[in-house]
Image: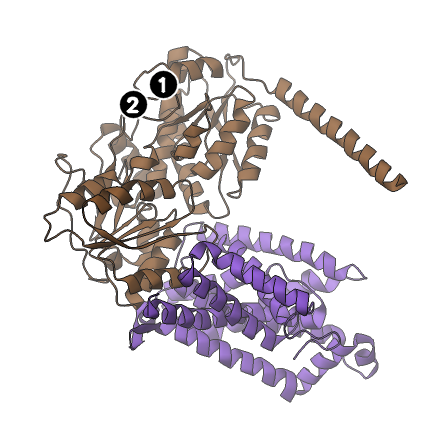
Chain colours: A brown, B purple
């Protein structure tokens, strides 16, 4: 009993100490005043998944952020202050990302914060920085759950994910009945990025008379996709819609399909094929032929800002326009948006930046125009579908767009 | 219920499960002889996969031929880790400390791999990686069948080493009672070092198969280690046969549940099996209280 009382006392004291520490941290790290002494850099705090499940995307995001910072610094920085990025790794953990932003603000005293990778991490990150009055501008947190949280400080510069697959669905339903797939399989990871995309188009395809022969969700922590892919193959769908977040998931499905002698007429994955050379290295260029992915940007974009960024990327990291991951553009766009907000508000005051971004102003980015609604959702971007055609990653949807090329359909057999 | 899907799931469970067993073999061998819980096993599997990758990309060496290089190389890696870190652990807290030390080792290796190979996913390639043969409507991937055979051969070789060689006798004597083994002239430290090396060497084969069936980077090790630990606990810590049986059982149950109900329940299902088995046999299916190599 005595031991229990002691334990409770220790816990009580610890709780008070912890609460005091957090309060002190909040006070000392409260949203920056907006002015930085002349000659001092502007510090931007970022938590990125440099290890763990999202490490490949985290690395690409880091490239995008660094590329933007280098470009800004070449032209004198932000309001004459050199940009310094304070990047810490969250190991793809939603818990660590909170700790990281608390440290970045209360200990490192960063002036601004940029978002991490994925909706899974952007939401806890936004909640953490909102306690300090900071804005969180991010490029990979477009899931509905992020906006439904009702936060006032989060701004996603990319395409909201729920409608990503709409151009694909419209294209499928626009096909003449004789060419349209008769059956479809929906298989998705239980991730806030993938599930909303897949579930949005199920009623559209069903209404068009396409029969669903497989519809299952798999947990994000699955390591062996073969049995799931084999079950999909056994159902023999003519179209496959895969809710994936990374290259290993898509590559495992492709490999299992090939081993099963199964090649769907249309195969679209929500993430993975947009990872440029990483995707090609994992699956092989021939197998990639015909694979589709929804997104708002690709390396061949005609946007002049994008062309400039791609040229600089290739100069620095090598490769081709098709090999540039869309993560790079998403991160770069974050920097562009915040730079315009800083310039317009004349400082680094986060409350002014938040108000400005909510004002309905249209900003420019490598992904195209950006305009936020009250939830921080970008209402301007157009959803596209991209496809690997040989070594080229091309835009195949929406129909009628001048940059859209003819879709490769049916998808060639594996290795062709 | 689609019969082809069910048969395919059963096939996947057996073939993939054997590869997991192969990856877990080193873990259970090391625990059986040394009472060391090697949390670095996952990253060592990935290191094995990266060694095969490097041989393939830079010297165009076939994945299976490359095992002639990667298995000895991983043996050396194991010896170095044992000498630098594991061998220095003493006292009654040795087993608990081994978890922390091997975790630190895994972080070191992960950092090194990220520096050398970057975090971008890669996958091992070969003509047999995507090809298959069919029995009825069920397709058998060559790489999975090869992995199954490789697991059988390597586990058989380990059995032979343990039960048909003088060194194996020393290992089993050390396992039964280290003090008594030392009294009859067995160099227990040397036996431990070599056992650790052997335990790590076999991960080269498991890593190669893993890398040929999955795109991977250094972070893939985190998904692996939890599965491998589950296998050796279910099979009985220290039991080679237990690891093989538990590896197949775990993946088989998960795959069947995934097909019959939903993949969402796959992971949970083998943890349910694990809990039920441990309630019945706390030492695992094939674990023994005194002599764990069985």
For residue B46, side relative to residue A406 (left or right) = right
Q: Is residue A218 left or right of residue A3?
A: left
Q: In this view, does B211 lie to the left or right of A394?
A: right
Which is nearer the eye, A198 or A49? A198
Location of the C terminus of chain A by quadrant is bottom left
Residue B161 in percent (x, y) is at: 61, 83
Q: Please, which residue is most extreme toward the bottom here?
A: B164
Residue depicted at 28% across the width and 62% down the height: A235
Q: In which quadrant is the N terminus of chain A drawn? A: top right
Q: Are marks 1 and 2 in contact (CB under 8 Å)?
A: yes
Residue A315, image x and y in percent? 31, 39
Quickly name the residue at label 2.
Answer: A364
Instruction: Between residue B253 and residue B48, name the one nearer to us.
Output: B253
Q: In this view, does B76 lie above or below B215?
A: below
User: Residue B286 bears which disc, if any?
Assistant: none
Query: Quarter-wise, where is residue A77 in the image?
Result: top left
A104 w.r.t. B132: above or below? above
- Vertical position of residue A364 compared to residue B234: above or below: above
User: Residue B217: x and y, percent?
Assistant: 45, 54
Residue position marked by numbered label 1 in the rendering: A340
Element under disc 1: helix
Asked whether residue B139 is in view, the answer is yes
């Amino acid at each position: 009993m005595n031991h229990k009382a002691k334990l409770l006392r220790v816990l009580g004291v610890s709780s008070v100490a912890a609460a005091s520490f957090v309060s002190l941290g909040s006070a000392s790290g409260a949203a920056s005043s907006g002015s930085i002494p002349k000659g001092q850099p502007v510090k931007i705090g970022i938590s990125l998944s440099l290890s763990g499940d999202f490490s490949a995307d985290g690395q690409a995001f880091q490239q995008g952020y660094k590329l933007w910072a280098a470009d800004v610094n070449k032209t004198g920085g932000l309001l004459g202050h050199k940009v310094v990025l304070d990047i810490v790794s969250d190991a793809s953990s939603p818990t660590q990302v909170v700790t990281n932003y608390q440290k970045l603000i209360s200990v490192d005293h960063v002036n601004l914060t940029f978002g991490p990778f994925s909706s899974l991490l952007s939401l806890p990150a936004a909640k953490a920085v909102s306690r300090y009055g900071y804005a969180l501008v991010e490029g990979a947190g477009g899931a509905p759950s992020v906006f439904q949280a009702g936060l006032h400080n989060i701004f996603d510069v990319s395409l909201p994910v729920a409608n990503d697959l709409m151009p694909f669905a419209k294209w499928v339903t626009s096909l003449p009945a004789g060419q349209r797939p008769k059956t479809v399989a929906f298989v998705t990871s239980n991730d806030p990025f993938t599930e909303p995309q897949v579930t949005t188009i199920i009623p559209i395809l069903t209404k068009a008379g396409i029969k669903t022969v497989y519809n299952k969700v798999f947990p994000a922590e699955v390591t062996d996709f073969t049995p799931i892919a084999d079950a999909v193959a056994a159902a023999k769908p003519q179209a496959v819609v895969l809710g994936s977040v990374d290259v290993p998931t898509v590559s495992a499905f492709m490999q299992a399909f090939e081993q099963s002698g199964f090649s769907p007429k249309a195969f679209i994955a929500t993430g993975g094929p947009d990872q440029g050379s990483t995707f090609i290295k994992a699956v092989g260029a021939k197998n990639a032929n015909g694979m589709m992915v929804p997104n708002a940007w690709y390396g061949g974009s005609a946007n002049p800002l994008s062309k400039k960024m791609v040229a600089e990327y290739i100069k620095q990291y090598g490769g081709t326009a098709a090999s540039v991951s869309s993560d790079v553009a998403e991160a770069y766009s974050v920097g562009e948006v915040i730079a315009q907000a800083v310039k317009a508000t004349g400082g680094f005051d986060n409350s002014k930046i938040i108000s400005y971004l909510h004002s309905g102003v249209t900003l420019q980015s490598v992904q195209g125009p950006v305009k936020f609604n009250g939830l921080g959702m970008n209402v301007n971007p157009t959803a596209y579908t991209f496809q690997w055609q040989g070594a080229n990653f091309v835009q195949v949807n929406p129909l009628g767009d001048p940059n859209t090329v003819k879709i490769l359909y049916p998808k060639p057999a594996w290795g062709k | 219920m689609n019969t082809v899907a069910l048969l395919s799931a059963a096939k996947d469970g057996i073939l993939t499960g054997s590869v997991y067993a192969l990856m877990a073999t080193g873990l259970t061998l090391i625990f059986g002889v040394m009472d060391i819980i090697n949390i670095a096993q996952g990253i060592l599997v990935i290191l094995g996969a990266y060694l095969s990758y490097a041989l393939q990309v830079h010297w165009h060496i076939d994945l299976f031929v490359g095992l002639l290089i990667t298995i000895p190389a991983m043996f050396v890696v194991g010896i170095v880790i044992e000498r630098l870190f594991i061998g220095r652990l003493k006292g009654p807290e040795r087993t608990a400390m081994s978890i922390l030390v091997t975790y630190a080792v895994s972080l070191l290796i992960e950092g090194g791999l990220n520096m050398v190979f970057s975090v971008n996913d890669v996958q091992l390639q070969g003509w047999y990686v995507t090809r298959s043969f069919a029995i009825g409507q069920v397709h058998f991937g060559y790489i999975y069948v090869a992995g199954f055979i490789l697991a059988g051969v390597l586990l058989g070789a380990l059995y032979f080493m343990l039960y048909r060689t003088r060194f194996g006798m020393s290992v089993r004597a050390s396992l039964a009672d280290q003090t008594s083994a030392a009294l009859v002239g067995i160099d227990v430290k040397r036996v431990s070092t070599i056992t650790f090396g052997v335990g790590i060497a076999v991960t080269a084969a498991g890593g190669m198969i893993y890398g040929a069936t999955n795109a991977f980077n250094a972070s893939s090790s985190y998904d692996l280690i939890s599965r491998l630990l589950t296998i050796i606990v279910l099979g009985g810590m220290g039991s080679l046969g237990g690891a093989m049986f538990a590896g197949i059982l775990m993946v088989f149950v998960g795959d069947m549940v995934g097909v019959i109900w939903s993949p969402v329940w796959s992971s949970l299902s083998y943890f349910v099996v694990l809990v039920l088995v441990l309630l019945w046999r706390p030492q695992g299916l094939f674990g023994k209280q005194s002599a764990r190599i069985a």
